[in-house]
Image (cartoon, rainbow, N blue to C red):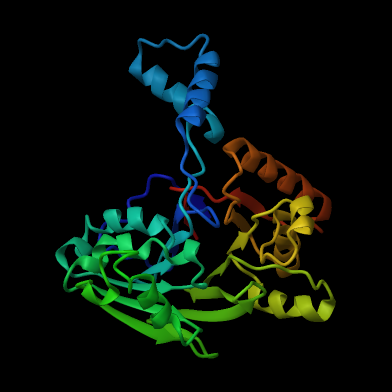
Amino acid sequence: MTINRYFNVAAGGKDFGQTMHIKFWGVRGSIPAPVGTGTITAKIIQAVQRSKGVDLDDPEAVRAYVESLPLEIRGTSGGNTPCVQVLAGGNQIILDAGSGIRELGEDLMKGPFGQGQGVAHIFMSHTHWDHIQGFPFFLPAYIKGNRFFIYSPKKSIEEKFTRQQVDQDMFPVRLGDMSARIEFITMGPEGVDLDGVKVRSLMLPHPGGSHAFRFDSGGKTLIYATDGEYRDLSDESLRYFLNFFQDADALIFDSMYTFGESKDKEGWGHSTSLMGVDLAVQTGSRNLILFHHEPTYSDEKLMEILEKTTSYFSLVRQDKDLNVLLATEGLELEL
């Protein structure tokens, strides 16, 4: 796997061959969590305090210094709610339509979507507000000629999208007034095939129901498993998930709570990074990406969780190799 934070995914017509490209546009859960002035000021102070010996009159030296700083000081993990972009088999695939889809839309407008020639497949894990709230602000959906196929195992998916924009007291533009062609597709148990990208779904334990998706293309496998809680740890119950997660190149996993908080918030429908490690080890997954971060967690807190998760893996690894990553806005992976 290659990590690339600067890969331009807006360009159209690129031949992606046998690889999968993944980019994170929104990684928080529940509600957007923008960084405030106080947090930015604290980051600047830390950066200045560490700059001893740096030639601040040399732009290149300053750039090198800033880029050497840890993410929690030089930047942020991001505050948008879930949206992940996947490029595979020549397909533009979008996972969930949280607030992160707004910035994805602005990026897509630089390519074919800006000329009304774009086609994308949107897979919805579920329609809790943090996973759907960005769609009314998705610019490519307002461009005539663009086509969007929205998939869900739930038969009511079109009604959910329509209801979000039906009352002009709540939002001024109705779904039917968007100029792009939008089609809703109910996924059956056999899944769907997007010209060689096989997509299957699995119901996860979550209030109202949520679905994980498995994408298989060119010998690579991506699992998107946000919003799930794994309370029943019996072999029979876990086998249901293990079979679906088996042998993934990348597992994007709901790790919203710490272990202690998961006990206090039992029944809220979310998991922990430690459960993600356990499932990844048992299924032979090669990369675990911690996702759907608690909105109150600071960047420092998230890095602490990443460090503790990596330490936990060292205790339970069973001679397995696993790369543990923290999902951050702008993070790009190539499988």
Seen at 66% across and 66% down, the residue is 269
Q: Please state the horizontal and vertical placement of residue 120, each as a whole percent of the image.
A: 32, 71
Q: Is residue 273 left or right of residue 3?
A: right
Above or below for 322 versus 230 = above
Q: Nearer the viewer, residue 316 or 138?
A: 138
Horizontal side, residue 190 vs residue 145: left or right: right
Name the image quarter holding residue 97: bottom left
* Residue at horizontal 51 percent and vertical 26 percent from the top: 43
Q: Quadrant of residue 304?
A: top right
Q: Image height check: is 17 above or below 67?
A: below
Residue 167 x, y percent position in the rendering: 33, 71
Asked if one can make out residue 196 in the rendered structure from this viewpoint, the answer is no
| 199 to the left or right of 87 | right
Q: Measuring 25% from the left and 61% from the top, which residue is drawn there? A: 139
**Of 166 and 45, the residue lying toward us:** 166
Q: Is residue 103 visible?
A: yes
Residue 92 position within the rendered picture, expressed as x and y whole percent measured from the top left: 35, 68
In the rendered image, the vertical position of residue 76 relative to residue 37, given as above or below: below
User: Which residue is painted at 53% across and 29% down in the image?
Assistant: 73
From the top left corner, tell me how far across and down residue 290 is, in percent.
61, 54
> Residue 129 versus residue 218: which sits nearer the camera?
129
